[in-house]
Image (tube, rainbow, N blue to C red):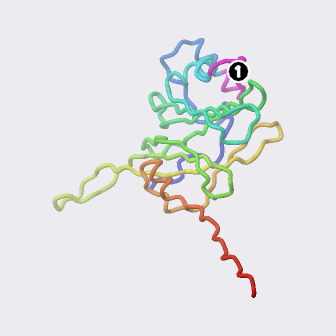
Amino acid sequence: MCRRLLLATFFLLGIPGSSFFLPAAFSQTAQQLEAQTIQQGIAHRQPGEADTTFLKRVLPVSFPASGDLVAYAWRPSAFGKQLFFVLGSGDNEYGNDLFILDPIEANTYAVQILPPEPFMGDKTYLASLFFADVDEDGQKELLTLLECSLREEFKMDGQWRIGRKTHYQTMIFKYAGLSSTGRPQYEEDTTPRPYLDELATAAEVRENLPKRKAPQRKPAARASK
């Protein structure tokens, strides 16, 4: 079974120790521009700029390599939706990185990443990301469905052989308010949920989440005669 594969909290890009790698086959100018965005952890959007145009401009290496964008109002914000995209494995030896651009002021975004840890030489992939109210408190959580392939022994025709088996793990992150500098913070929800282990799709995970029970109505009291 996959151990905890990702760090417990979101980190701003550029903090020492993060596992982000720029793909190699890009111009030096594009790499320098993206490195600057990563180091600052801030991206400024031009008024009226489309989501994809904005991302291609401030992250000209990673976003074109992704080609996949989710715009979703996860946390309360007066400045618009958060933007999510996943950088595919390619030159990233650690699997996939989840980028989050979170509006903190008008046309100003905090640039964050959910950095995966290396998994014992086995590649780990972020297969899906989605949102659900896991603990039924009215605030949706971010769910990341991870896929990893592990070398395992199995018996075939009376002989032990070595093959690979795919495992799945769902990690859950909660919004944890703003930092003293006004940056959004997130933390991993470490509540044990064994019923979410080894589910291969987001639909299966949703199906296995606890369902909110509608309050039962008490029968109306009869008027006394």
Q: Quadrant of residue 213?
A: bottom right
Horizontally, residue 128 falls left or right of residue 180, namely left
Looking at the picture, which amino acid does disc 1 mark? Arg
- The N terminus, quarter of image: bottom left
* Residue reaching furthest to the right: 180
- Residue at image point 66% right, 38% down: 73
Q: Position of residue 11 (x, y in %)?
A: 67, 39
Is residue 91 depicted above or below 11 in this figure? above
Horizontally, residue 68 falls left or right of residue 33, namely left
Q: Position of residue 69 (x, y in %)?
A: 55, 30
Is residue 149 depicted above or below 109 in this figure? below
Residue 170 in the magenta stretch? The answer is: no
- Residue at image point 69% right, 26% down: 39
> What range of the chain is rendered magenta?
36-50
Q: Quadrant of residue 189?
A: bottom right
Judging depth in this view, the residue of 52 and 191 nearest the camera is 52
- Residue at image point 68% right, 21% down: 36
Q: Position of residue 143 (x, y in %)?
A: 56, 47
Residue corresponding to mark 1 = 45
Judging depth in this view, the residue of 174 and 188 nearest the camera is 174
Is residue 138 depicted above or below 15 in this figure? below
